[in-house]
Image: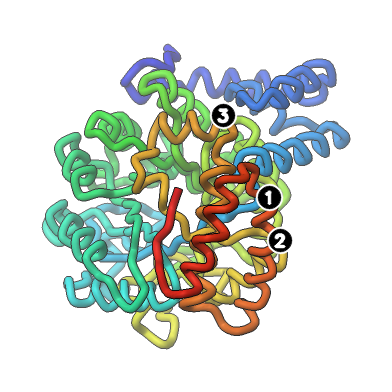
C-alpha cells in the first residue's frame, strides 16, 4: 500500500503506485487540457506531485514541451538567479565489499588498483584542491567496514577541515558514503558535515537486488530508508539521486519524486539536493551492457521537470557529462557542478589523470579555471559560497529563505565575494579579467541597497587581502 508518511521503503516507494502512475501518464500524454492544468499548477512555484510530473515527462505535444522548458528556465532564475555552486569530489578509498555490477569498485574486480589514503595523502590531495581554488568537497569511499570504518571517515573530515594552506580552506565537506546507522549519522553531524548524499541507484526493487547481488548494499530497505535515519541523526541536508541507465527512466523519475515527497511528508523538508548521474564507462564496466540508457534530449527534459517539480531543491551534475550537455542542463535547472574532478583515489596529486582506478570516465576534463571562465562567459556567477551551512541556514531554515525569495540578498552577494576571492588567489589573467567585469555588472543586481553597499566595501577589502566575508 502506498503511504508517503510510512517509514517502510516498500510503502513510500510503492511499486504498485509507480506502475499506476506510469499507466496514467501514458494514457494522458496528449491530453492537452490536463497538461495545461498541470503546467498552470507548476507556474505557481509550489512544485508538482510525482503523478503530475510523470504526465509532463510523457507529454508528446511539442508546444507544451516548449512551455515546460521555458518554465524550468524561469524557475531556475527565480530561485537560484545565475549562480552556479562549484565543488569537487574527493575519493578517499576504493576498497569495497559490495558486488554492484555497474561499479568498478565491486569486490570481484581483481585488476583495479586498491588504495586508501593515509591522513598525509588526504592532506596532499586537499592542498592540491585548495591550490585550484576549491572550497567545497564531496568525499567518497567504498563500503568496507574493515578498511573504511566510520572512524576513518571522521578522521579524514577532521583532517580536511584542519588544513589552511596559503589563502585556501575547505569550508564545507559533503559526504557520499554507504547507508549506515543513526548513531553514525549523528557522528557525521557532530563532525560538521554539510549534506549527506546517497544515490539510490534504482528504485525498482527487483532490479536493485539483481544489480547488488552481494554485500550489505543488497538490503534494499536498509539502503532506501537511509535518509530517514540520517535525519533522525540530526543531519538537516540530505541529497538524493538515481543512476539513470540502470532501469527504465520513467520508473526512476517517479520513484525519485516519491522519495522527495516522503521526506517532505515525514520530516517537513525535502531533499537539499538531487543528483542526476548517468551510467558511464569505467574499468571492468561497459554501459552498453545496460539497455536503459537515455538520450541527451530525454535527460534534459528530466532535469527541467525535476526543477519545476521540486523548485527549492538544488540540482547537481558531475563531470560524467560533457561540456555541451552541462551547458544545456545548467540553463534548465542545475545549480551545482563539479570542476576539474578526478574520480580515482589520490588523483589530484598526480600530474597525469590515472585511468586504471577511476570510478567512471570523466567527460569534462577541463581545469577549474577553464570551467570558471566558461561559466562567466555564459553569464553565470561561479560561486564558492558555503555561508548558509556555516550560518546554520540548513534544512527547513534554508528552504524558508529560498521560498521567500530572500536568497537573492544572501546568496547573490556571497557568490560575488567568493568569486572575487577566487579571482584574486587562483585565476589566470584572462579569467580574472572576465570575472572583474562580471562582478561590476552583477553588483547592480543586489536588490537591497544597504547589502549592496556592504558588498562593495567587502570587495575592496578582499582586493586588499582580507578573506571570508559572508551574509
The percent coordinates of residue 249 (x first, y second) are 59, 40
Of badges 1 and 3, the one in the foreground is: 1
Q: Residue at x 45, y 21 (%)?
A: 14
Q: Is mark 2 on a helix, strand or loop?
A: helix
Identify whether 421 is placed above or below 43. below
The percent coordinates of residue 250 (x first, y second) are 61, 35
Camera-nearest residue between 130 and 88: 130
Q: Residue at x 40, y 80 (%)?
A: 354
Asked if the residue under mark 1 is in contact with the one under mark 2, i.e. CB atoms within 8 Å, the reply is: yes
> How far is the residue under mark 1 from the one under mark 3?
17 Å
Residue 440 in which image quadrant:
bottom right
Residue annotated with mark 2 = 441
Counting other residues with Cα less than 10 Å from the Cα at mark 2, is it few (<14), some (14-19), or many (20 or more)? few
The percent coordinates of residue 276 (x first, y second) are 53, 48
Residue annotated with mark 1 = 445
Identify whether 42 is placed above or below 436. above
Of badges 3 and 2, the one in the foreground is: 2
First of labels 1, 3 by sequence position: 3
Camera-nearest residue between 204 and 361: 361
Q: What element carries label 1?
A: loop
Residue 466 in which image quadrant:
bottom left
Viewed as shown, does residue 356 lie left or right of 64?
A: left
Residue annotated with mark 3 = 404
> How far is the residue under mark 2 from the one under mark 1?
8 Å
Identify whether 112 is placed above or below 418. below
Using the rendered image of the protein, determine whether residue 94 is visible from the camera's viewpoint.
Answer: yes
The percent coordinates of residue 301 (x first, y second) are 69, 42
Q: What element carries label 3?
A: loop
> How far is the residue under mark 3 from the one under mark 2?
25 Å
Amino acid at each position: 500500500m502506498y503511504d508517503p508518511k510510512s517509514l517502510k521503503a516498500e510503502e513510500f516507494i510503492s511499486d504498485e503506485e509507480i506502475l499506476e502512475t506510469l499507466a496514467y501518464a501514458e494514457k494522458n500524454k496528449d491530453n492537452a487540457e490536463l497538461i495545461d492544468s498541470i503546467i498552470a499548477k507548476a507556474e505557481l512555484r509550489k512544485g508538482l506531485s510525482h503523478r503530475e510530473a510523470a504526465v509532463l515527462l510523457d507529454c508528446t505535444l511539442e508546444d507544451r514541451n516548449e512551455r515546460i522548458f521555458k518554465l524550468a528556465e524561469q524557475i531556475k532564475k527565480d530561485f537560484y538567479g545565475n549562480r552556479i555552486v562549484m565543488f569537487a569530489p574527493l575519493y578517499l578509498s576504493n576498497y569495497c565489499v559490495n558486488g554492484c555490477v555497474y561499479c568498478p569498485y565491486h569486490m570481484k574486480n581483481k585488476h583495479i588498483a586498491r588504495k586508501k589514503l593515509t591522513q598525509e595523502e588526504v592532506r596532499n590531495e586537499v592542498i592540491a584542491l585548495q591550490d585550484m581554488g576549491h572550497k567545497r568537497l564531496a568525499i567518497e569511499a567504498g563500503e568496507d567496514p574493515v578498511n573504511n570504518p566510520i572512524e576513518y571517515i571522521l578522521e579524514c573530515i577532521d583532517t580536511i577541515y584542519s588544513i589552511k594552506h596559503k589563502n585556501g580552506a575547505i569550508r564545507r565537506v559533503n559526504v557520499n558514503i554507504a547507508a549506515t546507522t543513526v548513531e553514525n549519522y549523528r557522528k557525521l553531524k557532530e563532525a560538521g558535515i554539510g549534506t549527506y548524499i546517497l544515490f539510490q541507484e534504482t528504485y525498482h526493487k527487483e532490479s536493485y537486488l539483481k544489480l547488488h547481488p552481494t554485500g550489505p548494499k543488497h538490503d534494499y530497505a536498509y539502503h532506501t530508508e537511509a535518509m530517514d535515519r540520517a535525519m533522525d541523526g540530526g543531519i538537516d541536508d540530505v541529497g538524493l539521486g538515481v543512476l539513470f541507465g540502470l532501469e527504465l527512466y520513467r520508473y526512476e523519475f517517479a520513484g525519485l519524486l516519491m522519495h522527495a515527497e516522503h521526506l517532505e511528508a515525514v520530516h517537513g523538508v525535502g531533499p537539499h539536493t538531487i543528483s542526476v548521474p548517468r551510467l558511464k564507462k569505467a574499468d571492468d564496466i561497459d554501459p552498453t551492457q545496460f539497455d536503459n540508457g537515455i538520450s541527451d534530449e530525454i535527460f534534459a527534459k528530466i532535469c527541467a521537470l525535476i526543477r519545476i517539480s521540486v523548485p527549492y531543491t538544488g540540482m547537481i551534475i558531475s563531470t560524467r557529462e560533457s561540456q555541451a550537455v552541462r551547458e544545456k542542463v545548467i540553463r534548465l535547472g542545475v545549480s551545482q557542478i563539479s570542476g576539474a574532478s578526478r574520480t580515482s583515489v589520490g588523483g589530484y596529486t598526480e600530474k597525469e589523470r590515472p585511468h586504471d582506478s577511476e570510478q567512471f570516465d570523466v567527460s569534462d576534463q577541463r581545469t577549474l579555471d577553464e570551467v570558471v571562465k566558461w561559466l562567466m562567459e555564459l553569464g553565470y556567477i561561479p560561486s564558492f559560497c558555503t555561508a548558509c551551512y556555516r550560518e546554520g541556514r540548513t534544512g527547513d531554515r534554508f528552504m524558508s529563505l529560498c521560498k521567500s525569495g530572500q536568497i537573492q540578498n544572501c546568496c547573490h552577494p556571497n557568490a560575488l565575494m567568493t568569486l572575487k576571492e577566487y579571482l584574486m588567489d587562483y585565476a589566470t589573467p584572462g579569467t580574472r579579467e572576465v570575472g572583474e567585469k562580471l562582478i561590476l555588472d552583477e553588483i547592480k543586481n543586489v536588490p537591497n541597497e544597504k547589502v549592496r553597499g556592504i558588498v562593495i566595501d567587502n570587495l575592496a577589502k578582499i582586493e586588499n587581502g582580507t578573506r571570508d566575508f559572508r551574509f
